[in-house]
Each structure stands twice: as C-alpha cells, then as structure tokens.
Amino acid sequence: KTQDVLYRDFYTLAGTDTLPENTPALLRQFKKREYIRIGLRDLMGRVTLAENVESLSDLADVCLQVAYEFSLDKLKRAHGVPVFTDEQDQEWESEFAILSMGKLGGRELNYSSDIDLIYIYTSSAGMTRPENPDDSIRSLSNHEFHSKLGQLITKTIHEITAEGSVFRVVLELRPQGNSGG
C-alpha cells in the first residue's frame, strides 16, 4: 500500500469523525492491523527486504502524520493559532515540521525499530491567537505551543496503553550516540 492508501485506510477506520478523541487508540489498532498484513506478506515471501522495510516506514510516516494532525487540532482548539510577525510587519502562522532520522529517515524501519525524530518550527517569537474572534482560548507563546505540540505527538505515538504503543519515539539524538554531548 502507498502512503496515500494507508492514510485513507486510517480515516476509513476512524469513521465519519475526522479526528475523533480516541485517535491514539485507533492508531494502535491501525498499526497492529497493518503489521499483520505486512508481516504476512513478508512470511509468505511476497516482498523483498527493501519492499518490506519501505512498507514499515510508510506506516510509521502515516501514523506520525495522523498524530500530528490530531495533536495540532487539539491544541489549536484550546490555545489558538501560533502567529509571529516578520521583519516587514507581516503576520504568519508559525509552522511545525517533524524530521525523521535513523532508520525511519533512511526508510529502513524494521519490526522492532524505534523512530528517531527532531521537531522544528518556524519561530518561537509571537503568541497564539484565536482562529475565530469569538473563540475563547488560553493564549501561549509560540515556544510553549510548539513544545506542547511535540509532547502531545510523542505521547500519542509513544505512550504505552492497554492497546500497546504505536512506535517508540527517541528525541535525544546526539552526534556520537549515548556518549555524545
């Protein structure tokens, strides 16, 4: 399955509610279902090693995208949109990105791999503001907003619940591994 098909399949599983409150549980269910499909194809010899690790990497990418969308939506409802003003006094929404490193970044994920991530965002300057003027929110600095966003994404993917976890997340990347500073 391509990433687009996986993405569509997740939202089919989620039903009519685009990002339901039980998205973290749905992600765990979705990952288990896809691991069974990918594993069976592997055991039956229907895929090469390269195709198998690419399928696992695609699954992780889709799960991260869904966790990002879920987390961003939740925080925007509570705290508004993070905005900053540039040098020309133009207002912009501060954007957030997830960089995949290690095996996921190299598209070589295996069944027991953790995912090494780096979170980056456009600007720590500025504050959140309501999407709609009538909305009541608790405003945060952009730094606080993006820190909470990274924490919620990590929790959505990494937290071990009764359904298990989606993927183990590692954020403490250092140049020489554990001995690096």
Image: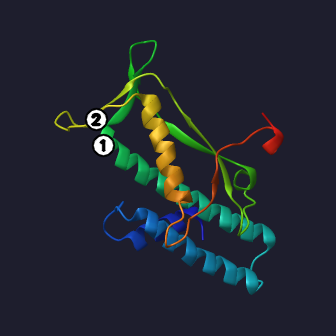
Q: Residue furthest bottom?
A: 44
Q: Quadrant of the C terminus?
A: top right
Chain-order first, disc 1 or disc 2: 1
Task: Determine the residue positioned at 83% across, 40% down.
Answer: 179
Task: Determine the residue positioned at 42% across, 50% down.
Answer: 71
Task: Determine the residue positioned at 39% across, 18% down.
Answer: 90
Q: Mark on residue 78?
A: 1
Tell me the quarter of the picture where residue 83 sits: top left
Q: Is residue 4 above or below residue 88?
A: below
Q: Quadrant of the N terminus?
A: bottom right
Q: How many marks can you see?
A: 2
Q: Is residue 8 above or below residue 146?
A: below
Tell me the quarter of the picture where residue 53 sits: bottom right
Q: Are marks 1 and 2 in contact (CB under 8 Å)?
A: yes
Q: Nearer the viewer, residue 164 or 69?
A: 164
Which amino acid type corresponds to the residue marked 1 in the rendered image?
A: Ala
Horizontal side of 27 relative to 85 (left or right) equals right
Secondary structure category for the residue under label 2: loop
Q: Mark on residue 114?
A: none
Please name the residue that numbered disc 2 is placed on: 138
Task: Determine the residue positioned at 70% across, 55% down.
Answer: 104
